[in-house]
Amino acid sequence: MPLRQADVLRGAMELLDEVGLDELTTRRLADRLGVRVGALYWHYPSKTALLDALVERIVDEMLAEPIAEQDWAGRLRELAVRARSTMLAHRDGARLVASFSVLPASAVTYFQALVDSLRTAGVPERDAELGADLLTSFTNGFTLEEQARQAKIWPRDRRDETFLSELDILINGIRVSLLEK
Amino acid sequence: MPLRQADVLRGAMELLDEVGLDELTTRRLADRLGVRVGALYWHYPSKTALLDALVERIVDEMLAEPIAEQDWAGRLRELAVRARSTMLAHRDGARLVASFSVLPASAVTYFQALVDSLRTAGVPERDAELGADLLTSFTNGFTLEEQARQAKIWPRDRRDETFLSELDILINGIRVSLLEK
DNA sequence: ACCTGAACACCGTTCAAGT
DNA sequence: ACCTGAACACCGTTCAAGT
């Protein structure tokens, strides 16, 4: 029976996890799906579009489970932790997510969840956006470097500890700069 | 007269700035240097080695000028601002720097400058390293996203403002978490 | 609707041979 | 010491033609 777009996407995700982003080629993907390269272009218009679909699927996972009720700091922490662990769950996940050419709808939702956490704590819109952007830049920068190099040096629990410590420093900055001013 | 390694490096940097990282191929570089592709491999053992040399040159620029005497917060700010502006000075600079396979010696010096700024303010070694890593992750994450997408949407002065605002929030976090505890 | 066959215009890398 | 010529093993993409 014929391939559907979802099969191509699933195959691409599996191949990503097995060989990494640099070895994820259209030809290897076609092989794995038992099809000729050209066939892929019936399902996706370009490799870029396929990678964007992968990014979307990964970012979707970040909000798959609802965020537990808690104070603003706990919500920010949970959102950041989840973004990191979702990217770490896929080989080269951070680099892939950083490379999107079409911003996934779920990325907007994610960013909005950060902004909302701060808004409900009384932070004005413009400041809440700054805080959300700061948190996102840190999380992505940390995870990108971690996945590219640190993961080969330090064990996961050590890296978790470091991430949480730095995250707390950052959240304290948001507290004194945006909440208590 | 024959090509020297420095010529290849300069040519690569110029090509990077003209066409970007994705179009920086060994063949285009060879064309620009008036040489056949294979000749490059006499000067650099691989494209990866050449890219690492580019990264090194960019990171070197970050500390080309001495850091002005000032308090720890001012020093951290200046170091972060300089890292960002140096990466922005080259097309795809942030993505290139994030991709290094051999950590440049100057990157160690840069990181140490961050750590030292905190150490002289009385922060213990381990905490100083956390703060330096936090600052680095943020700066790289911010600039990577900025250069990849935001630069096409917002003018430079608007992005400068945003970076400085977020940087201050982060530095306040370091202040209350690592200095005043 | 979905895929093959075959091509096009590229890549990075190697290496004997030339000067 | 530095480079050419030529090849090898790949890429992403297109598209007429097949089923």
Image (cartoon, coloured by chain):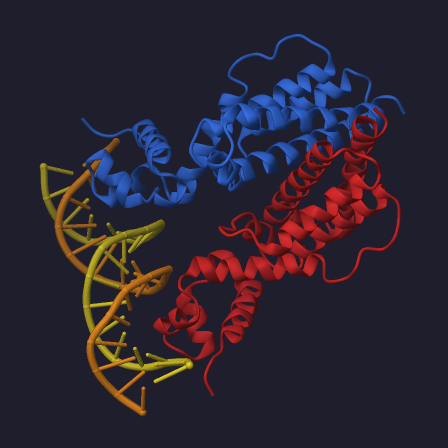
Chain colours: A red, B blue, C yellow, D orange
Q: Give me the residue at 60% from left, 13% from top.
A: B67
Q: Give me the residue at 65% from left, 34% from top.
A: B138
Left or right: residue A127 compared with residue A58: right
The percent position of residue B175, horizontal first and vertical second, equals 81, 23
The percent position of residue B172, horizontal first and vertical second, equals 78, 24
Observer-nearest of C15 and B168: B168
Q: Quadrant of the N terminus of chain B?
A: top left
Q: Give me the residue at 30% from left, 28% from top.
A: B7
Q: Is residue B111 visible?
A: yes
Observer-nearest of D8 and A60: A60
Please, which residue is most extreme toward the top here?
B69
In the figure, B88 relative to A56: above or below?
above
Q: Give me the residue at 33% from left, 44% from top.
A: B25
Q: Quadrant of residue B169?
A: top right
The percent position of residue A114, horizontal first and vertical second, equals 74, 45
In the figure, D18 relative to B172: above or below?
below
The percent position of residue B4, horizontal first and vertical second, equals 28, 29
Q: Total label count?
A: 0
Q: Quadrant of residue B43?
A: top left
In the figure, A124 relative to B67: above or below?
below
Q: Quadrant of residue A164?
A: top right
Q: Quadrant of the C terminus of chain B?
A: top right
